Image: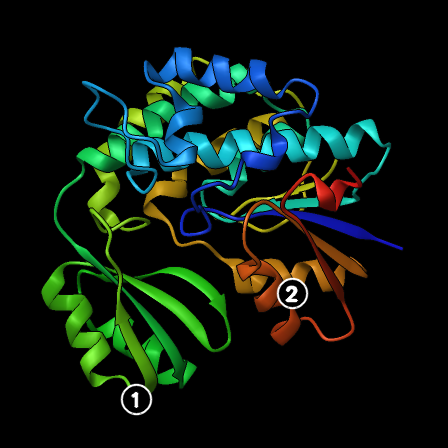
Amino acid sequence: MTIAWVFPGQGSQKLGMANSLLELPGSRDRFELASQILGRDLWKICCGEEIPNEEMFDLNDTRNTQPALFVVESLLVDDLKRQNRKSQIIAGHSLGEIVGLYSADVLDAETALLLLKKRSELMAAAEGGVMIAVLGFDRKQLDDLIKETEGAAIANDNSDSQVVLSGSPESVRKVADNLKCKRAIPLQVSGAFHSIFMTEASKSFAEELDQLTFKDAQVPVLSNVDPTPTLKGDILKEHLKKQMTTGVRWRETMNVMQNEGVTTMVEIGPGNVLSGLAKRSMKGVLTSQISNASDLGY
């Protein structure tokens, strides 16, 4: 049996997602560490409590979403490891890649949280651009429209039938309007993530990464920008530097998993979006979700 651990990104968060995790070993310390780094109470934010004299208490604010998902997903993976449960390959979707690097022992929790604080602040500050999810389309027509339309890109190539477009409002809407598809859904986001609109943010994030040493991974990791399995910490760092301006190649990631002989994909974190994509795209591969303490046997 070959097991893949995968970690979801933004959009999977929900209020109360950490409630069952508080009694897990290390949970209180992890939330305290995150709160110290952020300068606000992340546990209360996850619970949906309004914090007096604190404007940033919304879990859906990317500056809270990213560290909150890391804490939840990292606590789940910590407990899996305590139970001696292992994976043979690891991947994460967008910010989930940083959780994946943590789970592969490339980064420790404090370093990952510091990176996510910086990443989320840079992304929140980036202005301009839109994102539109597109479902049920002709791939060749989409590829042709993207080539013809300056300022539009595929931010998330999630499956054969689902992508997210990103870029300037005019360019992205032009592609969506001309593409024959079942549905085109504008996303409520603050900027055009995984596109050239993130160029300045990406440069600043790369400078932050240059100050860090990435250890070699204990388990092969598939990066969003290049889903080729690797253990090399320096390669994983270079891939992460490019992630903000490059599309998430999740469709190819699932293909690589199948080529690597993955038989079970375990989604670690709230929600089941990645499991749903796998069920439709990875024939014969079993999926499961670890999202709370009961899934861990508590």
Badge 1 is on which residue? Answer: 180
Q: Is residue 241 visible?
A: no
Residue at 13% x, 43% y: name it.
Answer: 127
How is this picture coloured? rainbow
Query: Which quadrant is home to the C terminus?
Result: top right
Q: Earlier in the sequence, mark 1 or mark 2?
A: 1
Q: At numbered mark 2, what does the secondary structure look like: helix, strand or loop?
A: helix
* Quadrant of res 65: top left
**Nearest the eye: 207 or 190:** 190
- Can you see residue 158? yes
- Residue 126 percent location from the top left of the image: 18, 38
Which residue extends farthest right? Answer: 1
Residue denoted by label 2: 255
The residue type indicated by label 2 comes to: Asn
The answer to whether marks 1 and 2 mark residues whose Cβ atoms lie closer than 8 Å is no
Identify whether 273 is placed above or below 13. below
Categorize mark 1 by other alpha carbons within 10 Å: few (<14), some (14-19), many (20+).
some
39 left or right of 226 in image: left
**Which amino acid is tagged 1?**
Lys
Of 87 and 70, nearer the camera is 70
Which residue sits at x=57%, y=26%? 234
Residue 295, x across and y down, in percent: 73, 46
Quadrant position of residue 242: top left
| Mark closer to the observer (1, 2) | 1
- Relative image position of residue 23 (x, y in whole percent): 66, 24
Residue neighbourhood size for the residue with mark 2, other residues' Cα within 10 Å, grouped as few (<14), some (14–19), many (≥20): some
Q: Quadrant of residue 287?
A: bottom right
User: Depth check: 67 or 236 in front?
Assistant: 67
Viewport quadrant of the N terminus? bottom right
- Quick check: 135 left or right of 191? right
